[in-house]
Image (spheres, grey):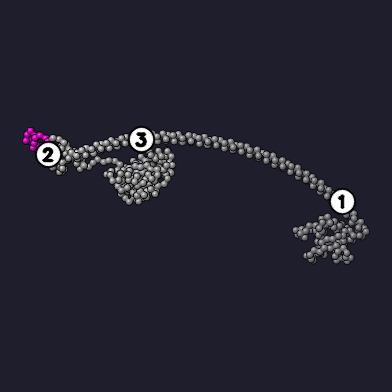
């Protein structure tokens, strides 16, 4: 069975049958299995109908002159199962479209030529749609009258009635019958009777032939129905087998996915554990190296401190010796900035007898500036972010608010000069 409940189908069918301009329509499955839907309709006849066909299973209904034909269009590439299902559904369509003179199953445009369609519709013959109807009252009377006439011509002339009364009754009855019937036609000749007999024989043979065709068609229909049912059974079995195979494949795939997920989780755990051990090993090694570096740094600092203390001791001894001899404690080259100038000047200096003397260079005999270290109130290392923005620099501040910034490139030289100044200032 199929679904033909689309209201457009019945309304368009009624319009075509009622003689409206619309004279054809097309229906199809519209990507469904057993629901037939209205596609399109037109009023330009069979030629327009053919142009609207597409390569899919379609059902058509066309009016040509005063005849109607049902068309099932099944392209060659359609599978046997779908072809069989279309045959079954075409019977439902024919049951809905009861007004039709012929049915046709076509697989190509050549099957739908004007000649084929008109031949199938037997245009020119007095045929009524689909189901025969009983003859009218006038037709029955005409047939009855002709049969009576043939019977009268083939019989001998009747004998006279035995009595006048019976003759009168028969005559009156005949008169009444003749009065009810139309005038008698001319007598039928023997040749006309023979022709009529031959025609009746042919009609009988035609009826027998049609009956045989109908019987064969019914047998063929039953065989086709059995074949379709067998195909449908096989199709259901194949579908069930396919569903079972797909379900098994799905279960197998699900099992493989679960096993793979478990393996991935275990692998992830192993990797995380390995990573944790490696990280712990790295941290232990880092800790060992840090401890070793700390010990090395302590040892280095201790060594540097001892060296600095030894150097400081030697320097102080040199300063004491120089103090006793009134000689130069320290001399060298440094960059000097006076508090009255924003500029740095490179000067040769000497520290002797509690004075810091600044010269243009080491060849100059006359100092440019002599700083009285006995008037120094502060000696400190410079803050790079506040004072000079330089390392290895220190500041000398005297009690007259004069100040001097001293910068030396080497830290060791800066420490030597600073220590010498501390010794002099501390001994004042």
Q: Which mark is residue 174?
A: 2
Relative to 36, is 381 on the left or the right? right
Q: CA distance from mark 2 to mark 3?
A: 54 Å
Residue 236's x, y, as percent?
44, 35
Residue 95's x, y, as percent?
33, 41
- Residue for badge 1: 310
Residue at the spot 16% in from the left edge and 43% down from the top edge: 185
Q: Which residues are magenta?
A: 157-177
Q: Nearer the viewer, mark 2 or mark 1?
A: 2
Relative to 128, is 142 on the left or the right? left
Which of the two residues, 51 or 406, is positioned nearer the viewer here?
51
Which type of secondary structure does the marked residue at label 3 adopt? helix
Sequence order check, earlier mark of 2 and 3? 2
Is disc 2 in contact with disc 1, using a CB cutoff of under 8 Å? no
Residue at the outermost right position: 325
Residue 35's x, y, as percent?
40, 42
Q: Quadrant of the C terminus?
A: bottom right
Residue at the spot 52% in from the left edge and 34% down from the top edge: 248
* Prevailing secondary structure of the magenta residues: helix
- Residue for badge 3: 220
Which type of secondary structure does the marked residue at label 2 adopt? helix
């Amino acid at each position: 069975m199929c679904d033909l409940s689309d209201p457009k189908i019945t309304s368009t069918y009624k319009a075509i049958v009622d003689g409206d301009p619309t004279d054809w329509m097309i229906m199809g499955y519209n990507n469904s299995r057993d629901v037939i839907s209205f596609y399109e309709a037109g009023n330009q006849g069979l030629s327009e109908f053919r142009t609207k066909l597409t390569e899919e299973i379609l059902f058509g209904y066309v009016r040509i002159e005063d005849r109607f034909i049902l068309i099932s269009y099944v392209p060659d590439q359609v599978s046997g199962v779908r072809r069989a299902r279309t045959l079954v559904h075409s019977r439902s369509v024919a049951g809905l479209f009861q007004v039709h003179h012929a049915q046709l199953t076509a697989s190509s445009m050549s099957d739908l030529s004007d000649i084929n369609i008109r031949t199938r519709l037997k245009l020119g013959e007095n045929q009524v749609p689909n189901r025969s109807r009983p003859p009218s009252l006038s037709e029955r009377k005409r047939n009855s009258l002709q049969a009576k006439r043939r019977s009268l011509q083939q019989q001998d002339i009747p004998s006279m009635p035995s009595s006048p009364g019976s003759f009168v009754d028969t005559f009156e009855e005949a008169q009444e019958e003749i009065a009810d019937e139309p005038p008698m036609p001319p007598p039928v000749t023997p040749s006309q009777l023979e022709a009529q007999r031959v025609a009746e024989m042919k009609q009988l043979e035609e009826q027998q032939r049609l009956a045989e065709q109908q019987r064969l068609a019914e047998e063929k229909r039953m065989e086709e129905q059995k074949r379709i049912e067998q195909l449908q059974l096989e199709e259901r079995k194949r579908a069930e087998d396919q569903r079972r195979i797909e379900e098994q494949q799905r279960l197998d795939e699900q099992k493989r996915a679960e096993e793979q997920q478990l393996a991935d989780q275990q692998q992830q755990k192993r990797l995380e554990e390995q990573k944790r051990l490696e990280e712990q090993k790295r941290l232990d090694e880092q800790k060992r190296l840090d401890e070793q570096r700390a010990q090395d740094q302590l040892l280095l600092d201790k060594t540097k401190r001892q060296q600095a203390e030894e150097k400081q001791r030697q320097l102080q001894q040199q300063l004491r010796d120089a103090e006793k001899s009134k000689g130069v404690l320290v001399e060298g080259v440094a960059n000097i900035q006076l508090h009255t100038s924003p500029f740095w000047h490179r000067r040769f200096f000497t520290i002797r007898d509690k004075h810091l003397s600044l010269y243009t260079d080491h060849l100059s005999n006359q100092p440019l500036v002599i700083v009285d270290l006995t008037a120094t109130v502060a000696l400190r290392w410079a803050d790079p972010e506040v004072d000079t923005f330089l390392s290895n620099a220190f500041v000398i501040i005297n009690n007259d608010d004069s100040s001097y910034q001293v910068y030396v490139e080497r830290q060791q030289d800066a420490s030597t000069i600073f220590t010498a100044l501390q010794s002099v200032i501390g001994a004042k």
